[in-house]
Every structure is written in C-alpha cells, then in structure tokens.
Image: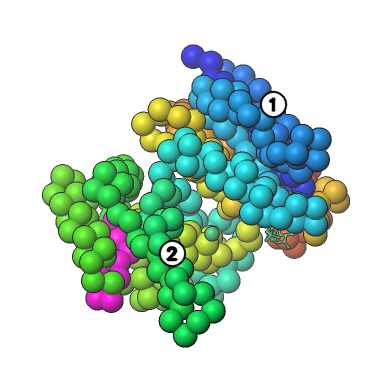
C-alpha cells in the first residue's frame, strides 16, 4: 500500500524543520519497505494569507481530506497577522472538522537531554498524555450579561457527552493495554467540580471494567501536576479532559527538556478523517531564517505518524535514531547546547535510521 501524506510546512521554522522531517521519513520508509507519496501545500501560512486574504482555500477539505495523514510544521506570524486569525483559520479547523478528538503527546526523557528535574535519567520518565480535544471545558455554551454594571455576569459551561467521554477513555485504556506497565491514570477534580468531574470518574470506572488487564488510578489535577514534577516515574498513560489535558500536555514535555524535540498527534482514531502530526512548538519568529531550529520535534512527529498508519517498525526506527543522535551529543542544535544547524541534525538522524 502507498500512503498519501499531505505536507503543510506553514510559517517560520515550520518551513525549516519540514525538509528534515521528510528526509527522515523517506529514510525510514526505504529501510522498512513502506511507500509514501507526498503532496505539498502552501496554505495555512502567512504567505498564503497575504496573497489570498484567507489562511486556506475554500476547498481545503477536498484538497487534504482524503489523505492518509497530514504532516504539519507550524502556523503563526504574529508581527503580520493576529494569532487567533491564523490558528483558527487553519489548525483549529483541522481539529474540529476532522474530529481529531485525541491529542496525544509522549513525555519521555531522551538520552543526552538535560532534564529540568534533578536526578532523572533516561528511562525514568516515559509516559503518554492523552487529552480530550473536542469538548469539555472548551465549549461555546455560555454568555455575558449586564456588561459594565454591578450585576455583570459571565458563565461558560463544561459540556461532557457520553460519546465524547467514552471514546477518549477507550483510546487511553487501549494505549495503556498495549504498553508493558499497563497502567492508566485519570486526571479529575471531583472534590471541587461536583457534576461533570464525578461523571468523568464514573465513566472511567465503567471503561476500566472492559480492560481488566489495566491497573488504573486517579488524582485530582492539583496534586497530579505536583506529581508530574516530583514523581514522573509513577506514570504510564495519563488521560484528561480538554482543560486538564491541555495543562498536562505542556507540563509533561517541559519536564523532559527543550520544546524543540516534543512531538504531538491530533488524532481521529477511526480513520474517518486524516490525523495531523506536528511538533509541539510554533513558528519561532525569534530564530526563524537562521537555520538553527531543532528539527527533532518535527522528525519525532513523523515517527508518531508511522505508528498511527500501522507502520510500527518504521516509527520505532525513527525514535531509536533520535535517541542515538542525541546520545552521541555531537550533532545537536543550539537549544541543546550544540552548534549543529537544522540540516546537519536532520541528516544525522536520517543516517542513524536502520
Ligand atoms: P514557539 O514555540 O514558536 O517559540 C517559543 C520559544 O521556543 C522561542 O524562543 C523559540 O525560539 C523556541 N523554539 C521553539 N521551537 C524551537 C525549535 N524547534 N528549536 C529551537 N528553539 C525553538 O512559541 P511562540 O513564540 O509562543 O509562538 C510563535 C508563533 O507560533 C505564534 O504565532 C504562535 O501562535 C504560533 N504557535 C503555533 C503552534 C502550532 O502551529 N501548533 C503552536 C505554538 C505556537
Ligand atoms: Mg497548550
């Protein structure tokens, strides 16, 4: 089978790290007999916006909706266009219209990367954060009344649906079941938030019954964030609602070093729509154009894309190549204390793939 990948570099360093991501994908595809076809798109960028007055063409869904996956760099050029226009005009449309209800991020301390947490070494921190990506606290149900008076009143509802909660929990339990430790942790706050969070807990309990091989526990979000920092070795798969997952999925990668290496997937697990794989970082205008951006977040996102497509060996070979490159400490970018440029680092990882 040949996989068709939509390639969207976007803005700033997105355009610089994308060629390295493609280089490594091609190297792994060749080694593992996987056939990839790339279609390149220039929309979802400031350059496109400047020419067309919008972030994407009207028929963007037809253009990329039938691909097996979308490989995405970064979008945003705040000096020229407000972030809410660029992000809501592209990335957030993908998430919503393609029903990418899972936001998935690995939290893994890599060799040769100093952890901001004292005394941790590779192997100590290795877990996944699974964030609900379509409902929960980020709803548009609410309003504002009596503005600028003493009676001013604002409200915003948390919306949890049985389908929405169950499908993210099922994904997280399946992921836990596939891992050696088979351990799931749920983020809750049912002591303070007395309607939606007890419901979330109830659904976790119900889903757990279908996965008798998975051990599970739950923590209130406040102590859970503390434990990410104090005891990152306690976790294997951590699942949270949209807001809690958002917080945890930034905190986790921050515990394992530079933002330049963190990958993510916005996933529609059923494959009814393409999923988006992208580095966690943005377009980094402060270093764009210098050729010094770390390409590893982009490259690792490619490994997640292979994994999602079912090409586990090809995905694994990329993660291992990243680990070996970082462990050697010779071809590292500036953010990791080295002086290699983006291309040299990308080539080093591509050469390590086997
Ligand atoms: P950013 O992630 O672009 O940069 C934050 C800091 O990290 C900067 O100092 C940057 O130089 C550094 N950095 C980021 N990636 C790096 C890499 N690969 N190698 C070395 N250093 C790296 O976040 P910022 O500055 O808040 O946002 C810039 C633009 O990117 C904004 O328009 C923002 O909206 C957008 N953005 C887009 C995202 C996306 O496309 N998913 C995600 C985050 C931000
Ligand atoms: Mg965030």
Point out the image quarter for the C terminus: top right
Whichever of callouts 2 and 1 sits on the residue coming sooner in the sequence is 1
At 56% from the left edge and 22% from the top edge, which residue is drawn?
62
- Mark 1 is surrounded, within 10 Å at the Cα level, by few (under 14), some (14 to 19) or many (20 or more) other residues, namely few
Q: Secondary structure at mark 1?
A: strand
Q: Identify the colour scheme used.
A: rainbow
| Image coordinates for residue 135, horizontal then vertical, percent | 38, 52
| Image coordinates for residue 304, horizontal then vertical, percent | 51, 39
Say which of marks 2 and 1 sits in front. 2
Quadrant of the image where one finds ligand 1: bottom right
Circle 1 is placed at which residue position? 40
Q: Which is nearer the eye, 320 or 282?
A: 282
Q: How many marks?
A: 2
Magenta range is 184-192
Alpha carbon distance from label 2 to label 1:
41 Å
At 80% from the left edge and 57% from the top edge, which residue is drawn?
79
Circle 2 is placed at which residue position? 143
Q: Eyeballing the image, is 282 above or below 25? A: below
- Queried whether the magenta region covers residue 41, the answer comes back as no
At 17% from the left edge and 58% from the top edge, which residue is drawn?
202
Mark identifier at residue 30: none
| Image coordinates for residue 63, horizontal then vertical, percent | 60, 23
Question: Given the current orientation, which residue lies at the most extreme top position?
Answer: 1
């Amino acid at each position: 089978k040949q996989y068709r990948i939509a390639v969207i570099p976007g803005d700033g360093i997105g355009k610089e790290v994308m060629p390295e991501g493609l280089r490594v994908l091609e190297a792994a595809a060749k080694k593992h007999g996987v056939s990839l076809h790339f279609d390149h798109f220039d929309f979802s960028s400031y350059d496109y916006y400047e020419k067309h007055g919008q972030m994407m063409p009207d028929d963007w869904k037809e253009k990329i909706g039938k691909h097996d996956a979308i490989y995405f760099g970064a979008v945003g050029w705040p000096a020229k266009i407000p972030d809410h226009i660029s992000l809501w005009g592209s990335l957030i449309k993908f998430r919503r219209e393609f029903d990418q209800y899972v936001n998935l991020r690995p939290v893994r301390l890599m060799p040769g990367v100093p952890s901001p947490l004292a005394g941790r070494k590779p192997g100590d921190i290795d877990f996944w954060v699974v964030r609900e990506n379509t409902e929960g606290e980020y709803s548009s149900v609410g309003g504002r009344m009596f503005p600028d008076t003493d009676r001013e009143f604002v409200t915003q509802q948390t919306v949890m649906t049985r389908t929405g909660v169950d499908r993210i929990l099922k994904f997280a339990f399946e992921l836990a079941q596939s891992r050696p430790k088979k351990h799931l942790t749920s983020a809750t706050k049912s002591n303070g938030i007395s309607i939606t969070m007890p419901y979330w807990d109830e659904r976790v309990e119900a889903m757990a019954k279908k996965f008798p091989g998975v051990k599970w526990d739950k923590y209130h979000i406040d102590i859970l964030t503390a434990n990410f920092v104090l005891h990152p070795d306690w976790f294997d798969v951590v699942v949270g609602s949209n807001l809690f997952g958002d917080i945890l999925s930034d905190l986790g990668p921050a515990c394992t070093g530079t933002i330049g290496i963190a990958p993510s997937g916005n996933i529609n697990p059923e494959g009814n729509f393409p999923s988006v794989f992208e580095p966690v970082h943005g377009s980094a205008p402060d270093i764009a154009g210098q050729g010094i951006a770390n390409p590893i977040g982009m490259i690792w996102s490619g490994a997640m894309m292979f994994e999602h497509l079912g090409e586990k060996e090809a995905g694994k070979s990329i993660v291992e190549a990243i680990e070996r490159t970082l462990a050697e400490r010779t071809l590292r970018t500036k953010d990791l204390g080295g002086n290699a440029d983006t291309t040299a680092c990308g080539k080093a990882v591509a050469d390590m793939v086997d």
